[in-house]
Amino acid sequence: MIRADAARNRAKILDAAEAVFAEHGITASTEEVARIAGVGIGTVFRHFPTKESLVEAVFAGIVQGFVDQARRLCDAEDPGRALFDFLEGMVEVSATKAAYADAVAAAEDALAEGRRELPRALDTLLTRAQQAGVVRRDVSMPELLALTAAVARTGEHAATSLRIVMDGLKV
């Protein structure tokens, strides 16, 4: 069992790393992460032996956040709004954190659970929106994931690109 102070330090490190990497990219130093977290560099490396393991943990947390949000929206009263709200949030986060995806593309073990769960939750959102007659029935979940990933990579044009894609998804 992890000590309460160690758990708090880990959470502070992850929060700081997400903020630092979002602002400076994943090339930012672990020393900067430690400084922002208010811990020593040794504490960072006790929790995350390599910088790559820290980046993977941050990215896994982001993916898990997507999964949690999608699950919460699965029972929303308005299935179409739930799907589109989820896509907007996912693209907004993904567009600012694209470097994480590139950095951990090979980190299948750390991300495997989130990568399995996210498509399931998104499929539920899509199916509910299609059943409500809001989204075209000829759109599949893999296509929706591909579109979302592509839109996220449009950088400063992501919001506009997503609006165009969402208009194309609507019945």
Image (spheres, rainbow, N blue to C red):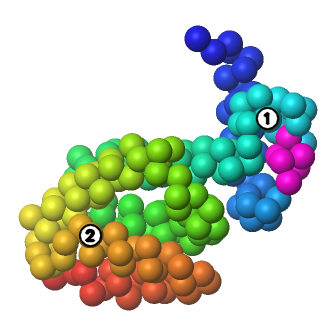
Q: Between marks 2 and 1, how big is the CA–CA gap? A: 37 Å
Quarter containing the N terminus:
top right
- Callout 2 amino acid: Pro
Is residue 59 a member of the stretch shown in magenta?
no
Majority secondary structure of magenta residues: helix
Give the label, 2 or 1, closer to the camera: 1
Q: Is residue 9 above or below residue 135?
A: above
Q: Please give the name of the residue rendered at 68% of the width and 13% of the height, measured from the top-left corner.
A: 3
Give the number of marks. 2
Q: Element under label 1?
A: helix
Q: Element under label 2?
A: helix
Q: Please give the name of the residue rendered at 46% of the width and 80% of the height, measured from the top-left corner.
A: 151
Looking at the image, can residue 76 be seen? no
Mark 2–mark 1 contact, CB under 8 Å? no
Q: For residue 154, which quarter of the picture?
A: bottom right
What label does residue 45 carry, if any?
Answer: 1
Q: Which residue bears the numbered disc 2? A: 142
Which range of residues does the magenta coloring cover?
Answer: 29-34
User: Residue 126: horizontal and vertical position, in percent?
Assistant: 22, 64
Q: Left or right of 77: which side holds 41?
A: right
Looking at the image, can residue 60 be seen? yes
Q: Residues within 10 Å of mark 2 (few under 14, many from 20)?
A: few
Seen as rendered, the residue at the extreme front is 106
Is residue 33 a member of the stretch shown in magenta?
yes
Q: Left or right of 19: which side holds 103?
A: left
Q: Residues within 10 Å of mark 1 (few under 14, many from 20)?
A: some
User: Residue 18: horizontal and vertical position, in percent?
Assistant: 69, 51
- Callout 1 amino acid: Phe
User: Residue 144: horizontal and vertical position, in percent?
Assistant: 29, 73
Q: Please give the name of the residue rendered at 78% of the width and 55% of the height, measured from the top-left corner.
A: 20
Quarter containing the C terminus:
bottom left
User: Residue 131: horizontal and vertical position, in percent?
Assistant: 9, 64
